[in-house]
Image (cartoon, coloured by chain):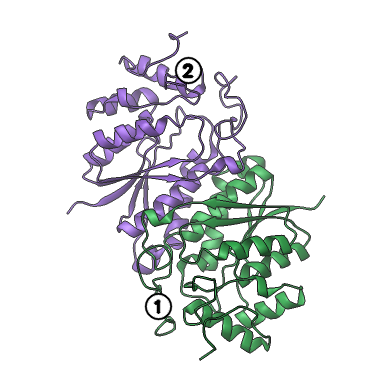
Chain colours: A green, B purple
Amino acid sequence: MSKKAVVLLSGGLDSATYLAIAKSEGFECYALSFAYGQRHRCELRAAENVAAAGGVKDHVVINIDLRKWGGSALTDDIAVPERKAAKNSGIPVTYVPARNLIFLSLAAGWAEVLGARDIFIGVNSVDFSGYPDCRPRFIEAFQNCATIGTKAEDEGWKFNIHAPLQFLNKAEIITRGTALGVDYSLTRSCYNPAPYGQACGKCDSCHLRRAGFARAGIKDPAPYVSAPQ
Amino acid sequence: MSKKAVVLLSGGLDSATYLAIAKSEGFECYALSFAYGQRHRCELRAAENVAAAGGVKDHVVINIDLRKWGGSALTDDIAVPERKAAKNSGIPVTYVPARNLIFLSLAAGWAEVLGARDIFIGVNSVDFSGYPDCRPRFIEAFQNCATIGTKAEDEGWKFNIHAPLQFLNKAEIITRGTALGVDYSLTRSCYNPAPYGQACGKCDSCHLRRAGFARAGIKDPAPYVSAPQ
């Protein structure tokens, strides 16, 4: 019997890639997505398509209304900026307070019920957007915290939080996923999509995606409102 | 200006007590409750009453459907036992996988938006039910994890997770709250209440509550289906 893993699945290109990596490592995958009040809710349709294409065992979408307190351009009435003014200029307004902490906590809960010890998340330290919850130290601290705060410690095992994209740049991620047969036409990355789901082409996320495909020498199959600038 | 604190508020007697403690320490309190698919959903009415009586600045109820995966007598079709067969007999079936981790993560998210560094939770090591997420080491690990995974570290501050009931027994909690003027008639503790909210008087939580009031020499004002056995 293959080992089970909970895979956080946003519907973006990173999540499609590490789902493929988890499968290639022999995990039986349980995809977990969140309707958290995000502006780019269309990513959930993408997540469904990616989950289906990736042959997951189950896909659960949890609703949590983070708009109750907002505090991010993704969950509040704050404009999504058209690409960060400067690299490393602090934590951007698209940071959603404690998002990865919340998502990983729910993943740990489901994993405990499933009897899974492995959780996949797409945090990244290279082309990353300056989010504090994408740091390797956070992932380590979470692993420790979740192990202590669940049955794991009493039962003598530990959570393994896999972040296989941590040290890859976007082009490397795309190259890796393409080699594993990921269909990137199913994925969506834009923070501020048009009503029919076309990517804006201007936000930080669109910029990183486009630059990654360009550097990988692979055509980006996502629909954009406008041509690259 | 008083400091802000997020106070996890279940509507049980512990939460009413540490809300009163937080207020007595000068915190402006923001109460956070969860509709997580719990069997004893009537505790949310109690939470509203306790929040109002406690003069909180705001009270948010977050819906998260933990029945999507269940795994606990509180969130699944598993019977609530009529008091644990033996003390320290392992983790009971009423344990909800990763519940305090999930609740604290959401509290950290709201705290970050509010500019609060303090979170109150009612974990307890004395009359506790054998839940791994009530251990002091878990609270420490969470504090560290939340500090690393949010703006806190970049801004040079730390989360303080207050667990003022950690080392009090139930009778001491009730005595303390009574001295602070807590109205325990508003609180509900039962895991398996009757349709009109009367406590079953038989589950572990009812047992702990009744024994606590008896030991404190204070009358328990909660309505019960049956008299003490």
* Residue at the extreme front of the image, as rendered: A196
Task: Give the residue at mark 1.
Answer: A81
SS category of the residue bearing label 1 = loop
The answer for which chain carries disc 2 is B
Identify the amino acid type marked 1: Pro
Q: Position of residue B150 (x, y in %)?
A: 42, 62
Q: Position of residue B19 (x, y in %)?
A: 30, 38
Identify the amino acid type marked 2: Cys
Quick check: can you spot residue A121? no
SS category of the residue bearing label 2 = loop
Q: Nearer the viewer, residue A65 or B227?
A: A65
Residue B200, numbered circle: 2
Badge 1: how crowded within 10 Å, few (<14), some, or many (20+)? some
Left or right: residue B129 versus residue B220 is right
Does residue A10 sit above or below A179 in this rendering? above
Q: Residue at x 50, y 47 (%)?
A: B101
Does residue B17 sit above or below A212 in this rendering? above
Left or right: residue A92 versus residue B59 is right
Q: Residue at x 37, y 14 (%)?
A: B214
